[in-house]
Amino acid sequence: MIPRYSRPEMASLWSDETRYRIWFEIEASACDALAKLKVIPEKSAKIIWKKGGFDVARINEIEKSTKHDVIAFLTSVAEHVGPEARFLHQGMTSSDVLDTCLSVQLSRAADILLDDVDALLAALRRRAIEHKRTACVGRSHGIHAEPTTFGVKLAGFHAEFARAKDRLKAARKEIATCAISGAVGTFANIDPFVEKHVAEKMGLTPEPVSTQIIPRDRHAMFFATLGVVAGSCERLAVEIRHLQRSEVREVEEYFSPGQKGSSAMPHKRNPVLSENVTGLARLVRGYVTPALENIALWHERDISHSGVERMIGPDATVTLDFALHRLTGIVDKLVVYPERMKENLDALGGLVFSQRVLLALTQAGMSREEAYRLVQKHAMKTWERGKDFLTGLSADPAITERIKPAALTALFDVKHHTKHVDTIFKRVFS
């Protein structure tokens, strides 16, 4: 993670200071439980909380010789606590601290991401309602298809990010487990009560079987969820980028006073924010495969996953947090051009109503094959020669003998395509 694409709250969650603070809370909470079990003196547990502290620089210095971060941390804490520090880490192993801490960090990261999604949902809802009736062309394969509304487009993205919220909630629940079970996870030297107590204090649930580590299928599911959410971010960003193209120009990212689009071309107003979201989404998805490959560890544990998680934990959450926040700002300030949307809707001379003509002919008794042939013939003339579609249809006796002129003209009413917008909005926003 780099400062350019980091927001303070998420970045601070992954700082050394925060990580060691969580480690201390895990160790001190375990001492509380051990005191309740009368394994250590209650007074000692209180002293650990009272005097407990650490120094990040000192930990780094100690680790240079120990080559072990947890031992370096415990040594630093002992320098603050004094003799009572001998009761720290009783019956525990390093993974008890590391994995439980990672669960806390990922759970808290999920909470931040859920807030991000809520903010994006609010922006999408507001803009969707604003443009509920703003007619525009729908496209398939990038080609004009049939009319829709810009509000319906945004409602679709709102529904997608509502699903993203549900997935993040499930991912948070999946990852929020605690392991304080000692070497190879058998509780041989520590009572399961300690794990239960620490879990409650840290907002987690005990891991059913923790083979010394928390099973990495949980982490894989978490990062895979982040990848899916990132994919949704990119889909919305790509839609905005397409709609901002000069040939389309139906929407545009807000261009602030004093902003510059190009060092060479003063006229440029580029969709740089949406392009940035696209790039960030690629990174988040890229972290999914290493998380999946972390599942298969040797026997009860190895540390092949460790370096991976030290990288992807901060990077994936920080990057997605930034992307979601940026996307919310894009949607919130998006400049929309309804007049241009209408121009594009009319650009093909009415071809977007071809299906209505096809269906009307079949309802008037013509076979579907013949109706398709007739409508396509006139559609291709309009496509290739730029003539008005309705004019060509109105001059064909094979069509007008089936559909009266007034009825034929009525088939070109865009309101037909927006008559169920209220139903769609009720489904999304009810």
Image: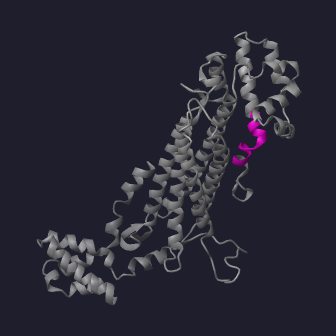
Rendered image coloring scheme: one colour
User: What is the x, y in percent for residue 334?
Assistant: 58, 66
277 and 408: which is toward the camera: 277
- Magenta span covers which residues? 10-21
Q: Quadrant of residue 344?
A: bottom left
User: Is residue 3 rendered to the left or right of residue 326?
Assistant: right
The residue under the point 31% across, 67% down is: 416
- Compared to residue 278, the image places residue 72 above or below, namely above
- Residue 266 in the image: x percent, y percent? 68, 83
Q: Is residue 138 left or right of residue 119?
A: left
Q: Is residue 156 magenta?
A: no
Foreground of the two, 318 or 99: 99
Outermost residue on the top side: it is 38
Question: Does the image show residue 169?
Answer: no
Q: Residue drawn 19% across and 78% down?
A: 373
* Residue 232 on image: x %, y %: 50, 56
Q: Is residue 430 left or right of residue 244?
A: left
- The number of numbered badges drawn on the structure is 0
Residue situated in front as seen by the camera: 17 or 210: 210
